[in-house]
């Protein structure tokens, strides 16, 4: 309930906000405020006599902060106009050096050629991912790792953090590589948010430093980037993306990662288009890691057809005897609930017995049969026993409370199966009510973990017709 700062300027330089906290919010919350260097303490008698001095100091701190902020912006503007690179880490392929007061960009002899290779391969492949994969296969460290380690290549005994197509797109549109320095594109607002500056206020210097890429190559790369954008935009026009039935239940059977849906538009010879969807493990397609060494993917229509056939086979009896499944399923769940309630009553009786034993131990102590240390030891053991029993009782109580939801979910699963009988369509309702998880393996084999699997098996066991 106490806030201690070195001086008032460390607490805040907006005098209205600082004053509001010190004079209103902290007293309301019962928080004591101390500014050591200024000798201010709201917990001391007489601190109110310093209120005027405090307000003046907060006002001065606020004015100082605004004055300093203005001077910093002016200094930054002047340095940009002088051609000094005022950004953070230089772009990959460059390093920043000091020439007097000016910070200049010069090619990094270790990585400049890699940048040229990136542009060259992008023009050949017209694919961000293809270029990233080539760099990853060579185990070339990405910019963030290179800045920290200074190593161009990742050693075999170190974990590799590779390139991705998102960063590749950022690199390929950076005009710094043609010797053009563009600065002041963003600024920090009074609300401490980074915002974009109007283009007319950008500070641009042509031929500011040695280029790594020729203008015509950069322009060719720009046209390829535009071509990729147009291709993605036009191919998806008018093609609706369906609901993802497997969003929360489909996982890679090798690495355990949730499978990612990928869709693209397939154009046919007659001019028609159709959206084709598939699921893939990102780890298996990502050359940055080796968590999933083999490609693991499956077309959505193949997965759906496999699951429909499996459901029809697995729940054939249920599809024929809906009412029997509902009744016996409810009976099984009710039986489990009664078992839990019986276990709960047993735990309560054990707690009562433990309390009686505690009273008996105290009587033995009063009669001199046991010492005070023995009484304390017994009480400690009894306390531990009661805590254990209470934990089990809480667990059972929560399970019983969840049994009603379980019964409703089971009936929902049966109804979803009945819809499958009338219309052979795999829906999100069917997936969520009937399936917990699906594991996909590289050979297209799937492993399904059904919800209420034990209940369905019990019902099937009771529902099988007698032989003979």
Image (cartoon, rainbow, N blue to C red):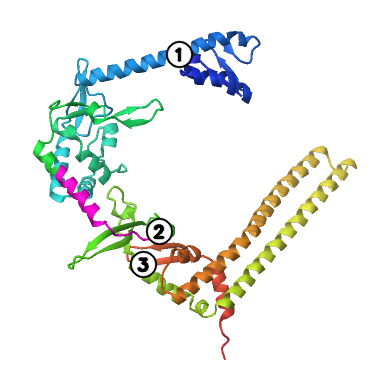
Disc nearest the viewer among 3 and 1:
1
Of discs 3 and 2, which sits in the foreground?
3
Question: Which secondary structure lies at badge 3?
Answer: helix
Range covered by the magenta-colored residues: 222-245
- Whether residue 245 sits left or right of residue 225 in the image: it is right
Mark sitting on residue 61: 1
N-term-proximal mark, 3 vs 2: 2
- Whether residue 294 appears in this view of the structure is no
Q: Position of residue 392 (x, y in %)?
A: 67, 54
Q: CA distance from mark 3 to mark 1?
A: 66 Å
- Distance Cα–Cα, label 3 vs label 2: 13 Å
Q: Is residue 389 above or below residue 48?
A: below
Whether residue 231 appears in magenta in the rendering, the answer is yes
Position of the C terminus, as image quadrant, is: bottom right
Q: Is 324 drawn above or below residue 223 in the view shown?
A: below
Residue under circle 2?
Answer: 251
Classify mark 3: residues with Cα within 10 Å, few (<14), some (14-19) or many (20+): some
- Residue 4 occupies quadrant: top right
At horizontal 74% and vertical 42% (from top left) the residue drawn is 380
Label 3 sits on residue:
303
């Amino acid at each position: 309930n106490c806030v201690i700062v070195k001086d008032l300027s460390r607490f805040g330089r907006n005098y209205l906000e600082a004053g509001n906290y010190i004079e209103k919010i902290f007293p309301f919350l019962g928080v004591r405020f101390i500014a050591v260097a200024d000798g201010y303490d709201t917990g001391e008698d007489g601190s109110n006599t310093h209120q005027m001095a405090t307000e003046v100091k907060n006002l001065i701190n606020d004015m100082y902060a605004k004055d300093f902020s203005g001077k910093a912006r002016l200094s930054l503007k002047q340095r940009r106009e002088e051609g000094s690179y005022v950004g953070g880490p230089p772009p990959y392929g460059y390093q920043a050096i000091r020439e007097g007061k000016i910070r200049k960009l010069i090619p990094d002899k270790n990585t400049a050629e890699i940048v040229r290779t990136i542009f060259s391969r992008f023009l050949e492949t017209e694919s961000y991912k293809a270029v990233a994969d080539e760099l990853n296969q060579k185990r070339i460290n990405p910019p963030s790792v290179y800045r920290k380690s200074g190593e161009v290549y990742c050693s075999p005994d170190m974990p590799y953090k590779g390139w991705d197509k998102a960063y590749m797109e950022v690199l390929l549109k950076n005009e710094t590589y043609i010797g053009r320095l563009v600065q002041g594109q963003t600024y920090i607002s009074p609300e401490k948010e980074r915002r974009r500056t109007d283009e007319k206020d950008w500070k641009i210097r042509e031929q500011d430093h040695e280029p790594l890429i020729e203008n015509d190559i950069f322009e060719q790369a720009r046209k390829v980037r535009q071509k990729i954008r147009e291709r993605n935009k036009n191919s998806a026009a008018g093609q609706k993306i369906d609901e993802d039935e497997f969003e929360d239940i489909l996982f890679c059977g090798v690495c355990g990662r949730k499978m990612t849906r990928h869709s693209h538009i397939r154009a046919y010879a007659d001019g028609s288009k159709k959206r084709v969807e598939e699921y893939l493990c990102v780890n298996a397609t990502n050359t940055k890691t080796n968590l999933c060494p083999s490609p693991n993917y499956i077309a959505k229509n193949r997965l759906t057809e496999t699951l429909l056939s499996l459901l029809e086979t697995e729940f054939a009896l249920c599809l024929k005897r809906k009412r029997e499944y509902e009744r016996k399923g409810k009976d099984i769940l009710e039986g489990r609930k009664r078992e839990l309630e019986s276990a709960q009553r047993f735990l309560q009786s054990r707690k009562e017995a433990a309390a009686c034993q505690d009273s008996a131990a105290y009587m033995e102590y009063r009669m001199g049969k046991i010492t005070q240390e023995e009484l304390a030891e017994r009480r400690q053991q009894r306390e531990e026993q009661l805590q254990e029993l209470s934990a089990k009782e809480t667990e059972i109580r929560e399970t019983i409370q969840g049994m009603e939801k379980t019964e409703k979910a089971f009936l929902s699963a049966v109804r979803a199966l009945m819809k499958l009988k009338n219309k052979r369509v795999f829906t999100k309702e069917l997936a969520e009510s009937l399936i917990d998880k699906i594991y996909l393996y590289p050979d297209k084999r799937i492993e399904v973990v059904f919800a209420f699997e034990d209940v369905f098996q019990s019902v099937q066991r009771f529902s099988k017709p007698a032989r003979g």
